[in-house]
Image: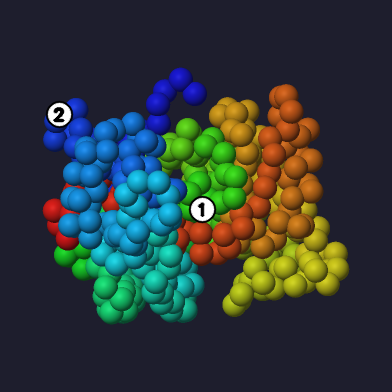
Amino acid sequence: MTAPPHEAHPAGPGRALPDTQQGMRRRNLARVMHTVSAEGPLSRAAVASRIGLTRAAVSTLVDELIRTGLLEELGPERPGRVGRPGSALAVSARGPAGLGAEVGVDHLAACAVDLRGRVRARAVRYGTHRGRSPEPVIEQLAALVRRVVAEAEGEGLWPAGLAVAVPGLVARDARTVVRAPNLDWHDADLSALLPADIPLTVDNEANFGALAELWLGEGTPRDFLHVSAEIGIGAAVVVDGLLLRGTRGFAGELGHVPVWPDGPACPCGGRGCLEQYAGEKAVLRAAGLEPGEDRVGLLARRAEAGDEEVRRALRAAGTALGIALTGAVNLLDPEAVVLGGALAGLAPWLLPSLREELARRTAGPACPVSVSELGPEGPLLGAAHAVVRAVLDDPAAVAECG
Ligand SMILES: [Zn+2]
């Protein structure tokens, strides 16, 4: 890739700090936080040697982070070592927490993740939102968020931000859902309906799923395509550890990449899009099944039991995914493709034909395709962790509002 990826959302990771003395202090606070977060518990001396600052400079930064509740001292480190024992520092298990929330077509979820990355509170509510306007749905989501906040506050945490994953296109203002076809939402500004006192970021569920994979996945490379599905099929492009968002923030619409140019009409206005072959509705239709509750579970159970019609439908979906991914892989040359969301649960029956198609059509060695191990909660966790990462990236900003 010659062009750098677009900058992240305002509250997202990778925000650049100004190149002033104040900016330098903030950057150093971030380096201390990231170091302790990745390798802690660590003594002040160990942090100083890791980031190449003097022990005195690190002590000043650490004192500030302890005062604002972002780091805590665990007591003397390894007694018996030569010299004055240093106190081990850890990222605080109290203080700021990341709130994640997800609007699914059939569920709502919210969770709180502390700075150590542990889920400390969560709430889920099932029920279809198809054909419902955004207001009542987001009101229910706000109630779930309040429940999670109350539970987290009981444990000494406070919300540093709220990130909401939605199955649709989100404007670069990180609050307006421009189009969510499976919810039938258009130009819905979610910020008016969510708690006004918590900084908000709204993003596509595939983007948060990809970030979860990047931050929490085992051995995830820094250049990869993340393909996920709930009802529609979305993808996220991660380049050198950052999301590639596109001019309007709409990058990753793999579901509307044409597989057969003369295929069936798609609600997007095109024809023969991937979603018409590998989307949930299409696969159910091809398998001779009716849409209903727990559709992915039903497909998996039927395929497992040897239902040849279901297996054939999934093989065909895998082929269509392989064709659509060929374009993306040839264009972007990622290190890997990761299947997440509902696709992960169907991988045993999708993967063989997907891999075969991709290998047959791509130049050079085939791009490896793996399956996410984060399960259906990937986007929710990615959302909460995006807030946590934003705290680690600029702890001074959080301390100011905490
Ligand atoms: Zn389409």
Which residue was labeled with disc 1?
A: 216
Q: Give the residue type at disc 2.
A: Thr
| Relative depth, front residue between 28 and 111 | 28
| Relative depth, front residue between 283 and 194 | 194
Q: Residues within 10 Å of mark 1 (few under 14, many from 20)?
A: some
Label 1 SS: helix
Left or right: where does residue 135 sit relative to residue 376?
left
Q: Identify whether 191 is placed above or below 55.
A: below
Q: Quadrant of residue 224?
A: top right
Q: Identify whether 238 is placed above or below 125.
A: above
Left or right: where does residue 199 sit relative to residue 240?
left
Which residue was labeled with disc 2?
A: 20
Q: Residues within 10 Å of mark 2 (few under 14, many from 20)?
A: few
Instruction: Count the numbered circles shown.
Output: 2
Picture residue at 74% right of the left edge, 28% below the top: 365
The percent coordinates of residue 390 (x first, y second) are 31, 49
